[in-house]
Image: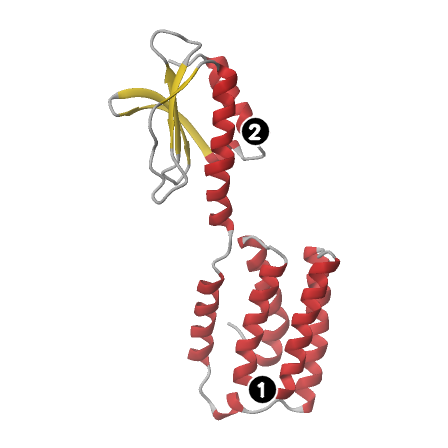
């Protein structure tokens, strides 16, 4: 049994790390026939297990998942006091939990690109899809690109370096109107949104927000996206 003050200390470490405590559970459980307090990251295999060493409340043995394929739980380790244990626990949060959450929250741009490209191909098929843009369409698109830039600035507040990348990508997309037919330009537009997502280091939610802004502006003009 871990003393409550030490259990509470581990919760405090999570709070001070900037992680949401609601992402974790803490309950007694067995690992290799030993009973531990097991702190688990919800919906994952990632765990940190701790129990008293022998009869002492002040010494601990612990095991934790490693940042490897399938997040295997490592060997039993010894901690001589609560201060040392909190250091090890904090290193686990920084070395295993945070990298895992970073990866989970990173948008899978290849998946988004393939899904969007597949959907776009399904919706295209008429000869008009391979026409060049009319002068009127070119004007409307360039005005919409300016509007898209303003929405990016308003919603994501890019710094100067990020804004330079955004401007370069949008200029390339604007120039592509004169060089490509509608079908090819749609693919370039989707790639541009992906590139801006990367340039702004957007997480999954923000990346989806950017994509929705893109659809909001261009769907009414060219029915680019569903």
The extreme left residue here reads 33
221 shown above or below 164: below
Scheme of image coloration: secondary structure
- Helix, strand or loop at mark 1: loop
Q: Residue at x 45, y 14 (%)?
A: 80
Query: 180 or 118: nearer the eye?
Result: 180
Instruction: Please state if 212 lies on the left or on the right of 76 as rendered.
Output: right
185 shown above or below 97: below
- The percent position of residue 84, horizontal first and vertical second, equals 50, 19
Location of mark 1 (residue)? 180
- Give me the C-alpha separation between circle 1 and circle 2: 52 Å
Q: Residue at x 68, y 68 (%)?
A: 148
Q: Residues within 10 Å of mark 2 (few under 14, many from 20)?
A: few
153 shown above or below 6: below
Q: Residues within 10 Å of mark 1 (few under 14, many from 20)?
A: some
Location of mark 2 (residue)? 15
Query: 50 or 66: nearer the eye?
Result: 66
Which quarter of the rendered picture does the N terminus lie within?
Answer: top left
- Helix, strand or loop at mark 2: helix
Instruction: Please state if 205 lies on the left or on the right of 69 as rendered.
Output: right
- The percent position of residue 171, horizontal first and vertical second, equals 69, 75
97 shown above or below 171: above
- The percent position of residue 56, horizontal first and vertical second, equals 39, 7
Dot 1 or dot 2: first in sequence order is: 2
Count numbered badges in the picture.
2
Residue 48's quadrant in the figure?
top left
Residue 206's quadrant in the figure?
bottom right
Question: Do the numbered discs 1 and 2 sit on residues whose CB atoms are within 8 Å?
Answer: no
Q: Residue at x 63, y 84 (%)?
A: 177
The extreme right residue here reads 160
Q: Residue at x 69, y 88 (%)?
A: 136
């Amino acid at each position: 049994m871990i003393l409550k003050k030490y259990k509470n200390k581990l919760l405090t470490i999570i709070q001070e790390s900037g992680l949401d405590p609601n992402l974790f559970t803490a309950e007694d459980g067995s690992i290799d026939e030993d009973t531990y307090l097991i702190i688990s990251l919800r919906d994952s295999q990632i765990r940190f297990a701790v129990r008293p060493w022998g009869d002492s409340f002040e010494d601990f043995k612990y095991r934790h998942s490693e940042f490897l394929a399938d997040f295997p739980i490592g060997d039993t380790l010894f901690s001589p006091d609560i201060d040392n244990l909190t250091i090890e626990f904090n290193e686990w949060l920084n070395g295993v939990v945070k990298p895992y959450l970073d990866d989970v929250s990173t948008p899978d741009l290849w998946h988004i690109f393939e899904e969007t490209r597949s959907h776009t191909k399904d919706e295209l098929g008429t000869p008009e899809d391979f026409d060049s843009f009319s002068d009127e369409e070119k004007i409307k698109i360039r005005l919409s690109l300016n509007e898209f830039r303003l929405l990016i600035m308003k919603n994501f507040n890019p710094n100067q370096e990020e804004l330079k990348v955004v401007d370069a990508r949008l200029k390339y997309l604007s120039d592509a109107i004169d060089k490509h037919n509608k079908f090819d330009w749609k693919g370039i537009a989707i790639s541009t949104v992906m590139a801006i997502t990367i340039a702004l280091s957007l997480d999954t939610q923000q990346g989806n927000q950017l994509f929705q802004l893109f659809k909001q502006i261009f769907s009414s003009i060219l029915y680019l996206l569903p």
